[in-house]
Amino acid sequence: MFKRLLGKPKQETNALATLDKLNETLEMLEKKESVLLKKATAEVERAKEFTRAKNKRAAIQCLKRKRLYEQQVEQLGNFQLRIHDQMILLEGAKATTETVDALRTGAAAMKAMQKATNIDDVDKTMDEINEQTENMKMIQEALSTPIGAAADFDEDELEAELEELEGAELEEQLLQPATTAPSAPIHMPAGRQQVRPAAQHSRTEEDELAALQAEMAL
């Protein structure tokens, strides 16, 4: 493992150095390609001049050199393509190596955490939590238990009494007469007197007779 850890920086350095070398080579090939293209263009211009001067042989020589330059440009393009392919492969390999190293580091960290957290310690901690929870429940039940005179009350009797009160209240509501609106006063026609009830008239005569007898006794 230590060899692997020590070798990783060296491998990474080698990959970076290789990429730098490939980039330098690619830049050099691009510069040569640019120079060859300029030379090919110059040969075309010279061929035009010789053509205008009716120097056909010299014009043909210029076109031959132009084609040679173009062949070299094509060859340099193939070289650049190969270098690009190599750089892509190298960058992919570098990314793969970095990914594997990251996964290896994560696995080592997880393994270290698992060693620090023993399963027995976890079980012990959970048992302690459950024990404390049960103790708290017992404390809450003890605090909610009635004491003194309230402890002597029978819950069943209290519930039965409450049901009787509710039944009596319901019965009283059912027997209570419905509220009626006050009757409207009766208007008698004019000239007609209201006839008093006979009982009331009899009571008045008896009172008058009693008062007369009292006066005679005096």
Image (cartoon, grey):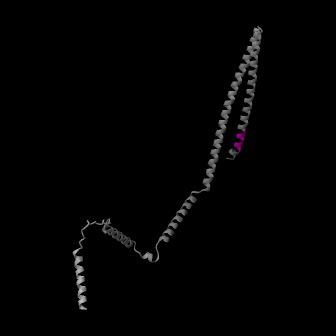
Instruction: Name the quadrant containing residue 97.
Output: top right
Kindly give the residue lying farthest to the front in the view shown.
191
Q: Residue at x 50, y 68 (%)?
A: 140
x then y, percent, for residue 165: 36, 71
Q: Is residue 94 left or right of residue 54?
A: left
Return the residue nearer the eye: 156 or 121. Answer: 156
Q: Is residue 126 left or right of residue 99?
A: left
Dividing the picture into quadrants, the one containing residue 217 is bottom left
Location of residue 160 in the rendering, given as x and y in whole percent from the top left corner: 36, 71
Residue 132 at x, y = what percent? Answer: 54, 65
Q: Nearer the viewer, residue 13 or 6?
A: 13
Please state, as top left, top right, bottom left or bottom right, where the C terminus lies in the image.
bottom left
Secondary structure that dominates the magenta span: helix
Region of the chain picked out in magenta, as a range = 6-13
Asked if 29 appears above or below 147 in the picture, the reply is above
Q: Is residue 162 left or right of residue 95?
A: left
- Residue 171 position, x and y percent, is 32, 69
The answer to whether residue 135 is above or below residue 114 is below
User: Is residue 11 located in the magenta-colored stretch of the structure?
Assistant: yes
The structure residue drawn at horizontal position 72% and vertical position 40%, both measured from the top left corner, is 13
In front: 184, or 55?
184
Identify whether 192 is placed above or below 111.
below
Q: Quadrant of residue 173?
A: bottom left
